[in-house]
Image (cartoon, rainbow, N blue to C red):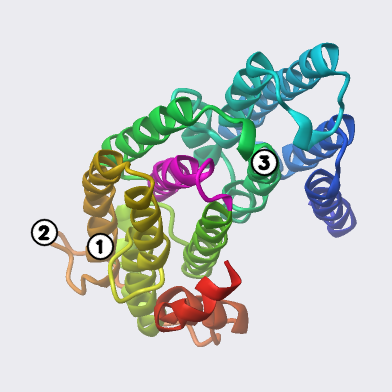
Amino acid sequence: MNPQANLIFIISLLLGTTITISSNHWIMAWTGLEINALAILPLISKSHHPRAIEAATKYFLTQSAASALVLFSSMTNAWHTGQWDITQLTHPTSSLILTSAIAMKLGLVPFHFWFPEVLQGSPLTTGLLLSTIMKLPPIALLYMTSHSLNPTLLTTLAILSTALGGWMGLNQTQIRKVLAFSSISHLGWMAIIIVYNPKLTLLNFYLYAMMTATIFLTLNTIKVLKLSTLMTAWTKIPSLNAMLLLTLLSLAGLPPLTGFLPKWLIIQELTKQDMAPAATLISLLSLLSLFFYLRLAYCTTITLPPHTTNHMKQWRTNKSTSTMIAILTTMSVMLLPISPMILTIV
């Protein structure tokens, strides 16, 4: 793709995200979401592969439907209350429609079917944008309307997302699909706590975005898309593969790594809200996703393929790892000790 065109699309993405997260009026928020959706479409379909075109079409259709529902929800609320302010979403039907629209935007169960397919059809860099920055505007809208959302509905969506995100990721061999189901599972953790402590949702999102960015950038550096190629990629940059192992375990939420922090705080908050059964259930369901993280981690650091066919060993690359990956990896692994400081901010 032409660098100038690429720059325009990236700037439009940042502009759309900024408009949505800084707006008070529903129409402005909707405009930001539309700019975002239109800017990412060329980035998904830039390879001109049939799968990429299919992914862009699916993305366009689902996001258009979700944007229409956001507009319908805000108009219904304005009709009943006379308010276009985002924080004044008080009508129950409007909040129900908005929850469905945001679930469709994010890829929460049962509106999750588009997300793995779109991620699979996109390049790794576009997949990174879809998994991180494209999730920020809908989460910001949920944050601003969190006081009027239905807790039972969100808890149900969250538990279903964690269950299906873990369950459907078990037999995947394509790494982008595994990361898509991992994203659905993490969104479940964010959705369950949004009504009770919205700041914890934002903290969880920031840490998730950081760990996912690390994994996508690392995979992009070693040029790996499938588990079978991941097994033989250790010869390229062994040190980077070792750090990828730790980042995957952090994304799984194992202590003493960074990913344990949001899970620990969310379980603590749910227990305070007398939701111990929900906390127990979501913790048990996250064990499903732990299995595929462990499988990815095993494939990352395995030094001999587990069968006797002669694999072509790949040459070690001499190019140095980028500073961005080094910083993100360090933060993805080592932020747990400063959790008291993070708690004072939250």
Residue underneath mark 1 = 299
To which quarter of the image does residue 334 belong? bottom left
Q: Which mark is residue 44?
A: 3
Q: Earlier in the sequence, mark 1 or mark 2?
A: 1
Residue shown at the point (58%, 27%) measured from the top left = 104
Residue 178 magenta: yes
Is 55 rendered above or below residue 182?
A: above
View extreme (left): residue:
308
Q: Which residues are magenta?
A: 175-198
Choose mark 2 or mark 3, whichever is in front: 3
Mark 3 surroundings within 10 Å by alpha-carbon count, few (fewer than 14), some (14 through 19), many (20 or more): many
The answer to whether one can see residue 326 in this image is: yes
Give the total of numbered labels.
3
Q: Which mark is residue 307?
A: 2
Q: Earlier in the sequence, mark 2 or mark 3?
A: 3
To which quarter of the image does residue 252 belong? bottom left
Q: Earlier in the sequence, mark 1 or mark 3?
A: 3
Mark 1 surroundings within 10 Å by alpha-carbon count, few (fewer than 14), some (14 through 19), many (20 or more): many
Residue 76: x and y in percent read 78, 13
Left or right? Give the position of 252 relative to 134.
left
> Cα distance, mark 1 to mark 3?
27 Å
Q: Are marks 1 and 3 in contact (CB under 8 Å)?
A: no
Task: Inspect the image, locate mark 1, and give the three-letter code of the amino acid beneath it.
Answer: Cys
